[in-house]
Image (spheres, rainbow, N blue to C red):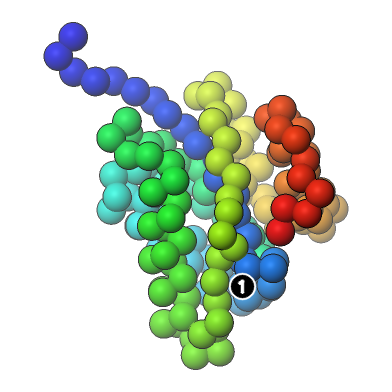
Amino acid sequence: MSHTFSKILIHAVYSTKRRHPFLQDKELRDRLHQYMGGVLKNNGAQPLGINGVEEHVHLVFGIPPSLDVASLIKETKRASSIWVKDQDPHLRNFVWQRGYGAFSISQSILPRVQRYVAIQEEHHRKQTFIEEWNALMRAYGLEVPQNPF
């Protein structure tokens, strides 16, 4: 076969350092999510959903086989951190946490994950980020760390 075909879908989650609520301004947050989609696209990925709340973000994207998840997330964090700091001098201390969660998803559940990401504000009226994180870890068969952040 002379061509490469793949469909690799990722649901990534990460928070601000120490889960500090840097992103309280909804308008800024919405623009940040758009910017992050552009970073993904400019790096060859396909943004399929980005949303979050004051202290964390969810990204759903397709990634070509020529890219690796770690490098793409690192670049998205780097570029978006610079962008946030440029938007408001009060956010000069903005930084994402060092780690992240990246979970593979199948095409069959993509619409469900996209809906879940789209309703983050509503979702977090009922569940904290730590509760959400622990549920994701269990759903993917990973050990829930004592203090992940």
Hey, which residue is sitting farthest front in the picture?
146
Specify whether 78 is left or right of 50. Answer: left
Residue 12 in the image, given as x and y percentages of width and height? 55, 45
- The C terminus sits in image quarter: bottom right
Residue 86 in the image, given as x and y percentages of width and height? 41, 82
**Image: 112 above or below 3:** below
Front in this rendered view, residue 87 or 130: 130
State the residue at coordinates (43%, 55%): 74
Hey, which residue is sitting farthest top in the picture?
1
Hey, which residue is sitting farthest left in the picture?
2
Hey, which residue is sitting farthest right in the picture?
126
- In the picture of the structure, the residue carrying the numbered disc 1 is 23
- The N terminus sits in image quarter: top left
Q: Quadrant of residue 95?
A: bottom right
Specify whether 84 is left or right of 71. Answer: right
Residue 96 in the image, given as x and y percentages of width and height? 56, 65
Is residue 60 in view from this perspective?
yes
Q: Secondary structure at mark 1?
A: loop
Q: Residues within 10 Å of mark 1 (few under 14, many from 20)?
A: many
Specify whether 99 is left or right of 80. Answer: right
Q: Quadrant of residue 39?
A: bottom left
Specify whether 58 is left or right of 46. Answer: right
Is residue 34 in view from this perspective?
no
Total numbered circles: 1
Residue 89 in the image, given as x and y percentages of width and height? 49, 90
**Image: 145 above or below 25:** above
**Image: 11 above or below 15:** above
State the residue at coordinates (45%, 51%): 73
**Image: 112 above or below 77:** above
Three-letter amino acid code at the position of disc 1: Leu
